Amino acid sequence: MVELKKIRKGKKDYFYLVHSYRDGKAVKKKQLYLGDSIPENLDKKKKEFIQEFYKEKFLNNIEKIKKNFNTEYKAMPKSAKEKSKENFAIKFTYNSQKIEGSTLTLKETANLLENGISPNSKPLRDAKEAESHRKVFFEMLDHDKNMNLQIVLKWHKDLMQSTYEDIAGKIRNHNVAIAQSKFKPPMHLELDTLLKEFFDWYNKEKKNTHPVELAALVHLKFVTIHPFTDGNGRISRLMMNFALKDNNFPLLDIQYIKRTSYYNALERSNLKEDDNIFIQWFFRRYLAEYKKYLK
């Protein structure tokens, strides 16, 4: 909890924001000096103060995760590394497709992608899209140049070509709505400008923003633009992982079972126009996914 504290020195009062928090068994405090008067935008100052506190706390642990994960990964034999990538590709494909409505189970996805066994009782479209998603995932891993609109359009084309050829790799030329969401994506006439602004932002911020925060923002900002008729979520999650991979951070698989909190964080960020809502959700999800590397 953030409290306003007044300290009197001589005949003058000085004001601070103070946040008390537990670190193990100890209670610690972090404070921010406000000046000799209470600022008019005190609520905004409190919000920014707590956001910076949690960002700092999260990122210290995230750096530990990166270090310990990469130490373990480098020690693995080549065959184990390849198996690890394949296992992640299967789970990531299963969850990313399931979030978008796929009927395949994790076991069915694994049998399909590892052994080429397509489930008889499930729609062929789900199987084709799973195969395409795995293909694009490895394309993303192998892409060692800058991420730009051309490569994202290619990923989308490769993802959707076998099921929705008419929209594959194409920016939508019509307006869309998101089912069960109060958020309205931008009109199609705005997309060219918004996409240019997105990649201008990305090229600037990839050098100035922490990679895990950058990954969260890449996902949030791109899916908010919603440039495709379908496949926006899957492409934004691939782009998110490109930002992580490009900076040698462990990739993130957003699990289907976590979809409610995931959807809520995205929608609240959009409706309140506050990126920090999704960023903090993303940090917590990342730390929970890799908590074993904090021991």
Image: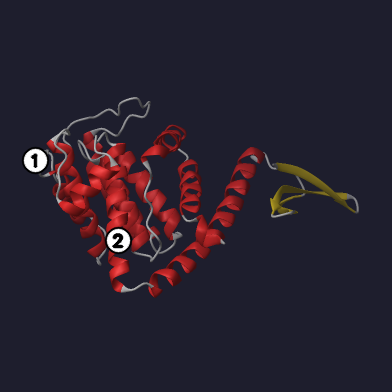
Look at 28% across and 70% down and name the residue there. Answer: 79
Q: Which residue is mark 1?
A: 165
Give the side of residue 12 with respect to residue 189, left or right: right
Q: Quadrant of residue 57?
A: bottom right
In the image, residue 203 sits, relative to residue 92, either above or below, namely: below
Q: Is residue 171 visible?
A: no
Can the viewer see residue 118? Answer: yes
Q: Specify whether 5 is left or right of 121.
A: right
For marks 2 and 1, the one nearer the N-term is 2
Question: Number of marks in the image?
Answer: 2
Residue at 47%, 40% in the rendered image: 274
Q: Quadrant of the C terminus?
A: bottom right
The amino acid at mark 1 is Glu
Q: Which amino acid lies under the numbered mark 2 shown in the image of this protein?
A: Lys
Residue 85: numbered disc? 2
Q: Callout 1: 10 Å neighbours few (<14), some, many (20+)?
A: few
